[in-house]
């Protein structure tokens, strides 16, 4: 558990006793901004290979992937229990009955205590939310929406094909259904200043969220963004570690203290990663961040001001 901010283990401890591990699942979904539902080409920064573990392959069934994941983690922690993490692409994009069948298959695997479902805010129809409401009565369910930014100009540039109002609506409907909600944000998207990033944090802090996942923008081989940057269409802010730690400190002091900050960094495979190549493992970055927070005397939410957080709209 983190000393200076509420982290994911704090959140999980509110719901479970003992140690839980997420096991990623790739159920073969696509995304609505890939298949033509709302757009084509996908998000410009996205190469899904950059975050799928080796055991996570859609050629295996959902239960088969989870059993592979249990083998991987169980060698070191034989008493571990698990959350099935539907991570790849948009895990609520499809026929509602089929989706529920896949979630039920995951929950039927011994040792699986609940679900984390990663999706987009424009892919949560009321019909599915009603089914998840019923599922959440019997099992732990966390819905994690990819928001990435609160600025509509940025969302257009990266081809998200939804706006910030859509994110707010999805979060409110999910929270009203009594289901825990998380958001995913990327810091350093093209065209965004540090003030833009912190305004997103302020807007996020006003929402009824349980978790937030943050990470630095990663420039990945094979993405449209990598081509755009290489072609000089635009550039991106290239943080050195110290600069990014300073930004994270500012985020911590502005983030609503009731929201668990699950992470600050992500690490794509070296063979795909163009930038940043910091050479730090996640725990090493967290140690550096905690040392900086300690030295500066920063704790989560010291600058959080509920009444000042949300402006009239995102641009």
Image (cartoon, rainbow, N blue to C red):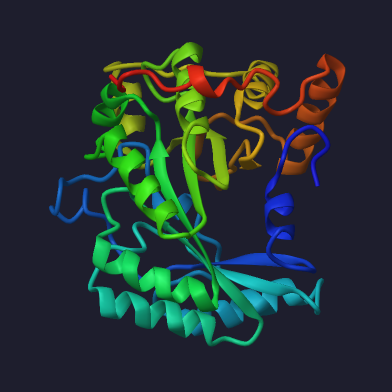
Picture coordinates of residue 160, whole percent (x, y): 27, 39
Residue 26 picture quarter: bottom left
Of the pair 70 and 145, the residue shown nearer to us: 145
Instruction: Name the residue at 69% across, 58% down.
Output: 12
Instruction: Name the residue at 24% across, 36% down.
Output: 159
Of the pair 129 and 2, the residue shown nearer to us: 129
Instruction: Name the residue at 41% across, 69% down.
Output: 133
In this view of the protein, can residue 215 be seen by the observer?
yes
Picture coordinates of residue 246, whole percent (x, y): 68, 17
Residue 60 picture quarter: bottom left
Whether 25 is drawn above or below 248: the answer is below
Of the pair 101 and 76, the residue shown nearer to us: 101
Picture coordinates of residue 121, whole percent (x, y): 32, 48
Instruction: Name the residue at 55% across, 62% down.
Output: 53
Q: Give the side of residue 309 with respect to residue 240, left or right.
A: left
Whether 156 is drawn above or below 66: the answer is above
Picture coordinates of residue 3, whole percent (x, y): 83, 37
In this view of the protein, can residue 27 be seen by the observer?
no
Whether 238 is drawn above or below 283: the answer is above
Whether 12 is drawn above or below 248: the answer is below
Q: Give the side of residue 234 with respect to residue 269, left or right.
A: left
Q: Give the side of residue 216 with respect to residue 61, left or right.
A: right
């Amino acid at each position: 558990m983190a000393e200076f901010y509420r982290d994911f283990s704090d959140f999980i401890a509110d719901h479970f006793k003992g140690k839980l591990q997420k096991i990623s699942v790739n159920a073969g979904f696509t995304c609505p901004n890939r298949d033509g539902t709302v757009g084509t080409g996908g998000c410009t920064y996205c190469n899904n290979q950059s975050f799928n573990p080796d055991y996570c392959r859609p050629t295996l069934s959902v239960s088969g992937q989870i059993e592979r994941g249990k083998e991987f983690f169980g060698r070191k922690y034989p008493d571990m229990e698990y959350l099935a993490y539907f991570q790849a692409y948009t895990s609520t994009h499809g026929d509602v009955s089929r989706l529920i069948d896949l979630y039920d298959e995951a929950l039927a695997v011994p040792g699986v205590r609940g679900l984390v479902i990663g999706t987009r805010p424009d892919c949560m129809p009321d019909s599915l939310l009603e089914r998840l409401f019923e599922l959440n009565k019997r099992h732990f369910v966390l819905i994690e929406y990819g928001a990435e930014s609160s600025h509509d100009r940025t969302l257009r540039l990266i081809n998200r094909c939804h706006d910030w109002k859509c994110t707010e609506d999805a979060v409110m409907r999910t929270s009203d259904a009594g289901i825990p909600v998380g958001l995913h944000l990327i810091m350093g998207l093209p065209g965004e200043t540090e003030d833009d990033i912190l305004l997103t944090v302020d807007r996020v802090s006003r929402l009824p969220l349980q978790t937030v996942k943050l990470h630095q923008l990663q420039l990945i081989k094979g993405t449209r963004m990598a081509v755009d940057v290489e072609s000089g269409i635009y550039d991106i802010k290239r943080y050195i570690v110290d600069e990014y730690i300073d930004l994270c400190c500012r985020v911590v002091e502005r983030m609503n203290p009731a929201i668990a900050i699950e992470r600050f960094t992500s690490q794509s495979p070296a063979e795909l990663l163009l930038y940043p190549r910091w050479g730090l493992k996640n725990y090493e970055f967290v140690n550096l961040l905690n040392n900086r927070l300690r030295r500066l005397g920063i704790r989560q939410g010291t600058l959080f001001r509920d009444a000042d957080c949300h402006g009239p709209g995102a641009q």
